[in-house]
Each structure stands twice: as structure tokens, then as C-alpha cells.
Amino acid sequence: MATKVVMEALSPTMEEGRLVKWNKNEGDEVKAGDVLAEVETDKAVMELVARGDGVLRKRLANEGDASPVGTLLAVIGTADENIDSIVGAGAAAPAAASTANQAANTTESAGKTAAPPTPAPSQGEASTPPQPKAGAASGAPPAPRSAPPPPPPRPAVPPVQQKGNGAHPASPQQSGGRQRTSPLARRLASEKGIQLGGIQGSGPGGRIVKRDIENAKVSGGAGRSAAAERLAAEGDFKDVPLTLIRKTIARRLAESNGPVPTFFLTAELDASRAAEMRAQLAEMGDQYKASFNDIVIKAVALALAEHPEVNAHWLGDKIRQFNRIHVAMAVAVEDGLITPVLFDADRLSLWEIAGKARDLARRARERKLMPEEYTGSTFSVSNLGMFGIDQFTAIINPPEAGILAIGGVEEKPVVIDGQLEVRQRMRVTMSCDHRIIDGATGAKFLQTVRRYIENPLSLVI
């Protein structure tokens, strides 16, 4: 009996997946548990395994395709088994979607009019109705609806080539004593975004040839900015398709920033002793190295143990306070953000937190985390201090009660016991869900975090 290979929910929050790579070809024998393909989820790249034995009879999705969970991707069966009914049913939905997309594209295309199509479509349709197609004789009346119009006459001037939302002639006109250009030179100029008007041709009769375009690139390209280079290569704009991780980030942040009543608490902490401890630990060897982020995570974990009302989730009809402390740390990846979790962080030593944090961050950037490694957190921290950010506010990751945003450590003049001193200072900002945390509750939590960071020996004993 044939086995359907569908897009599985490979992570708890996954709604669609992108097929990165097929590991099996049509006709290959497969066994249950074999890796058929690699799939990009909203958080990582996961393996899609076979759920039955047989031959991979048909692949219905191409590499790079994004499909909702449950979509039929392939069929496994015996070599002589009839799978037409399965393949037909699986292809019906994509075909319908493709037809709908084509219809939408047709509706949105520039210059769409009710007139019947011409036998030969023009390169650039006008954006205002109703005008003759590009290449048609100027002032010609529109063709009657009852019959298609005759083929347009051959254009007297070179067609216009589109780039972005701007346009420029493909080449100078070759009549009336104007510049003459070889076809190769025109193509090279178009590819490089070089205007032909200011180029002096070196060919016969002043004709612009290939070497003129190459010389113009060498002489004029060096001073162009990065924006000018992009403009030349891509036109006025470039549309970047959304990746699955970016779609998930957008959805989750919309869920948080709207419904969650959030307030913010900011505190400036003295990080001088923490900086001294870091330096002394580093002198003991690499195995004792710890970052400020590691120190803050340890301090947060211990503070959560003292304030269980902050280590909580909002569940709509109740608040769930956790007796275990799982701290998520935000890690910037190539196309967004992911939050691997340090489970039972309050029970980990500072060096265990440092080692696990480095490993999780590395594998997060390589998109190699398993779903259970970035789900299940009870509180989160986000650090932008390494980018020179003094202070910022982070968006809560529902259903968590809060998130702590960590700024950079910098030297500042401060007054201590009536004396002006230069100290290492660090700002932290806590975003609080007011449905769970009141102002005084959040303030007391930050006081505890301050106590641990300003007395860092309590983190290592």
C-alpha cells in the first residue's frame, strides 16, 4: 500500500515548511526512517524521514518550494503500484493555487484594459488607461472589440527597457547624426547601468563599441557609492520574499505588541566588580571564561527563584507559576531571531551556562537546533550590548511574563559616597506583562538582579 509523504509539523509553531533539498530521487528504494529531504521550518533546518518502505515513486514538490503543513510532497509505493489517484489528488490543490495566482497577477498587471490581446505582446505596457501599446503607431484608434487589431507596425525607435520602476532608452537613436552603438555595447551598458549619452564612441564614424563601455566602467565606476551600484544593478527597488523565520517573527511580535499590556522598568547597574571577576576568571584558563551575558543569565535565574510570580505564563483564564527556571536567550541569526533555552538555569554553574550558551548560539546560527532546544522557556533575556547599544526595550515572547533587555557595559563618571569615580555601568530594561507583573513586583525583581550582578561572587559560590 502506498505511503504519502506530507509536510510534517517539525516544530511546535510550524505552519509551513520550505523544502531545502531532496536526499532521494524518484526510483530510489527507501526504508522507514530514511531521510528523504531537508526542510526549513520557522526556526531550523530539520530532516523529513520516510514513514514506510518501498520505492520513491513520485516527487510532487521542488527544492525551494514552501508548502503548508499537511501538503503532499511525494509518494512511496511498490514498483508496479498504481498511484495515479494519490498523485492527482495531491496535485489538485497546488494547481488551483497556481491558477489563482496567475489570475491575480493578470488583474494587477500595469496597463490592463478590456481590449483583446494583440498577436504580439509589447515589451512595456502603459500604466494609464487606455493608451496604445508600446510599439503601436502614435494616435492610432483602438481596435474594435469584435475582432483583434492588426499586428502593430515595426517601431521606428528602439524599445524601452524597464529597470525597477524607471525606464531609459536601450540605445541612442542612430538617425539625425546622433550616436551610433553596437548591439553588444548596448547590452553591456544596460547590464552595468551605464548611460550612453556621455560616452564618446571610438568605432567607425564615432560608433560606441564594447571597449568604450569597458573603459567607461573603469573610469566612472570606482567613485560610485554602494547605493549607486545597487541602483544600477537592481533598479529603483528590490522585493525580498519573506522567509519562514521572518513570517513567524512577524506573527509572534504582532501577537505580543498588540494584546499584551506592557510596561517597562529600566535600571542602571554597577558592573565594575563583575568586570573584575571576568578578567580574573579568564586568567585561570579558557574553561573559566564567562561573558557579561552569561553573568546576567545566571543572575536572572537566581532572581527568578526568589520571585516565582515573575517566572510565569499568562494562560488566559489563569496564571501558571513555574517551579523550574528555563531562561531563553535571544540569538541573532542570518534572517531573524531564535531563542534557545538554558533549562534549569538556576541549577547550572556560571561555567556551565557559559559553555551551553556558546554551543546553543553556534548551532542556532547554523540552523541546527532541535525544536526541544528552543521551546519551553519561562523567561527570556536579550542582549544588544555587543553592538554598542546603551539601552533598548525588548518585546515579550508570549505567554511569558517578561523579558530583560541588556545594554552595553561602559565607563561612566558616577558619585559614590560623595566622591566622583569612573565605574563600569550597564543598563537593563525589563518589559513586563501587566496582567501578571505589577510595577512593584517588577521593581523588586530588578533589585534582586542588581544585588547579584553588583556582588558577582554570589554567582560562583
Image: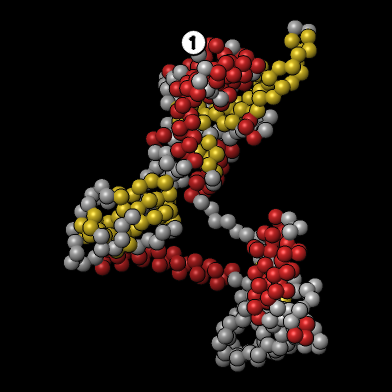
Amino acid under disc 1: Ile
Which residue occupies 53% across, 53% down? 242
What residue is shown at x 73% (from left), y 87% (from top)?
A: 138
- 326 vs 107, nearest the viewer: 326
Image coordinates for residue 37, horizontal then vertical, percent: 35, 53
Residue 390 vertical position relative to residue 80 in the rendered view, above or below: above
Q: Is residue 321 above or below residue 420?
A: below
Tell me where residue 417 appears, x and y as whole percent: 75, 7
Pick whichever, 428 or 331, lies toward us. 331
Q: Is residue 215 visible?
A: yes
Left or right placement of residue 166 versus residue 331 in this view: right
Mark 1 residue element: loop
- Who's the residue at 65% across and 16% down the image? 272
**Which picture quadrant has residue 184?**
bottom right
> Where's residue 179, x and y in %?
78, 82
Q: Is residue 185 left or right of residue 307?
A: right
| Residue at the spot 47% in from the left edge and 22% down from the top edge | 287
Q: In this view, does 422 lie above or below 316?
A: above
Query: Residue 248 or 29: which is nearer the viewer?
Result: 29
Read off the residue under disc 1. 461
Q: Split into 4 quadrants, where in the image is the N terminus?
A: bottom left
Residue 258, x across and y down, in percent: 59, 39
